[in-house]
Image (cartoon, grey):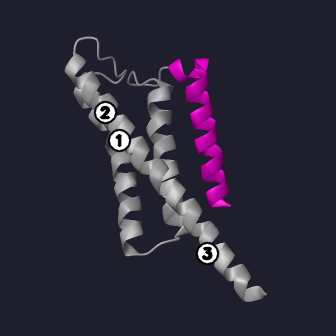
Amino acid sequence: MLITALVAFVLFVGGSLLAGADFLLWVLPGGLPLGNLLMPSGMLAAAAIPLLVKPGGRRFRAAAWFGVALAAVWLPLGIALAGNPELDFINRPAGSLAFHSYTVATMAVILGMLLVTFFLTVRTAMELSEFDE
């Protein structure tokens, strides 16, 4: 049930970000746009899925925790590099490049872990079905 809720949340966040939904610009107390809160929340949810499915061993879990750590650092790093909670890099172009590179790398790790989780889960299911025959 929790995994289903996380997948639904990740799809909602991803769809909202890709569609450029208007509510992403709503400003929360403290000046943080809602989209800047949803992005790391979606990344954390996606990074947590492999930990809940548990298809691999110790190295797999370490890599999954690495993805969680990368997602958890995303917003504080962005605010530090931009100098503001809106993540407006207009006066800090070097920070923009660094932050965008970090975002791409973080997403690659998380998506990679999700793919590995999927393939390991399918392999395990296939192995179990062979024993049923």
At a point 29% along the width and 17% down the height, the residue shown is 89
| Amino acid tagged 3 | Thr
Q: Is residue 130 above or below residue 36?
A: below
Q: Is residue 115 above or below residue 40?
A: below
Residue topped by disc 2: 101
Quote the CA–CA distance across marks 2 and 3. Answer: 34 Å
Give the SS element for disc 1. Answer: helix
At a point 61% along the width and 75% down the height, the residue shown is 124
Magenta stretch, main secondary structure, is helix
Residue topped by disc 3: 124
Q: Position of residue 91 (x, y in %)?
A: 23, 12
Give the SS element for disc 3. Answer: helix
Q: Position of residue 64 (x, y in %)?
A: 41, 60
Is 38 placed left or right of 59 in the picture? Answer: right
| Amino acid tagged 2 | Ser
The answer to whether mark 2 and mark 1 are in CB contact below 8 A is yes
Which numbered marker is on residue 105? 1
The residue positioned farthest toward the top in the image shown: 90
At a point 47% along the width and 72% down the height, the residue shown is 56
Q: For this rendering, which residue is in front, 72 or 130?
A: 130
Is 89 placed left or right of 41 in the picture? Answer: left
Q: For this rendering, which residue is in front, 127 or 37?
A: 127
